[in-house]
Image: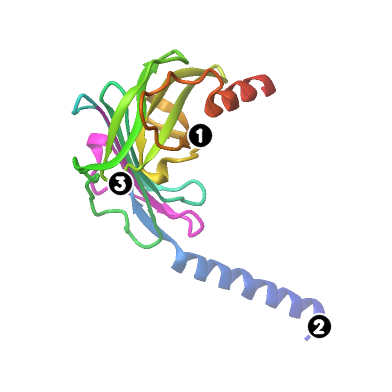
Amino acid sequence: MPQSSTWKSLFIICVFTTFVFGSVGAYTCTHCFNETCNSNSQSCETSQGCFSYKQEFYVSGMSSDFIQEKGCSSNKCAQLSFSATLGNERTFVYDHRCCQAEQCNKQDFQLSQKPSNPNGIECPACYTENDMFCDSVLLKCTGAETKCVEVIGTVAINGISYLSLFGMGCATETACNLRNVTVVRDTKIHTYCTGATNGTPPMMPIFSPILTSFFLLKVLL
């Protein structure tokens, strides 16, 4: 057999093998958003994976915003679960799950409820929107929220990021040092954890590490 024919045959075999194994490795994920979450499905590439997430924002113990979504990840899926309780009785719970198998994200799950028992940690807490300063009060942390956190939220308008919220309070360790995590109302949050506070809570420092980072980012942009 001529060498050119041999290379041509090998090329055809490689293409066929890639197609067959690629088809076998492909799978579908449940696809839905909020109230429309049902049995709809979409085909995913093996390099993507399925995701399922829920997030809920509470004000004074009442649900203010709730989002759930399922589908194929556009890139590598990263699992993340955290909660935070800020000043003015603002609480946020987030759970993003990943898997790689046929319809592996179909089953529903419930957001974990934060235990009400104090854990001995106290943090300065406050919450404000469209501002960078707020007076804090001491907040008794509960459950797994053992870290004091500062949270800054930004929204993008015409490609420019604007400050939308600032908060302080208690959070789980998994809520520390997050960058550009998208939450309700298309807000991207950035977080920074500090040590617990004893005694009289201070006002939010003018040069808070997280706000300093935000200002530096604005300058660089």
Left or right relative to 161: residue 220 = right
The reply to whether callout 1 and callout 2 are in contact (CB within 8 Å) is no
Residue 38 covered by magenta stretch: yes
Rendered position, 164 above or below 112: above
Lower position in the chain sequence, tag 2 or tag 3:
2
Q: Position of residue 115 (x, y in %)?
A: 20, 43
Q: Nearer the viewer, residue 181 or 12?
A: 181
On residue 2, the disc is: 2
Q: Quadrant of the N terminus?
A: bottom right
Residue with the mark numbered 3: 144
The reply to whether callout 2 and callout 3 are in contact (CB within 8 Å) is no
Q: Position of residue 10 (x, y in %)?
A: 69, 77
For the residues labelled 3 and 1, the Cα–Cα distance comes to: 23 Å
Q: Residue at x 42, y 20 (%)?
A: 165
Residue with the mark numbered 1: 180
Which image quadrant is residue 117 in?
A: top left
Which image quadrant is residue 12 in?
A: bottom right
Under circle 3, the secondary element is: loop
Lower position in the chain sequence, tag 3 or tag 1:
3
Q: Amino acid at mark 3?
A: Ala
Q: Residue at x 44, y 54 (%)?
A: 44
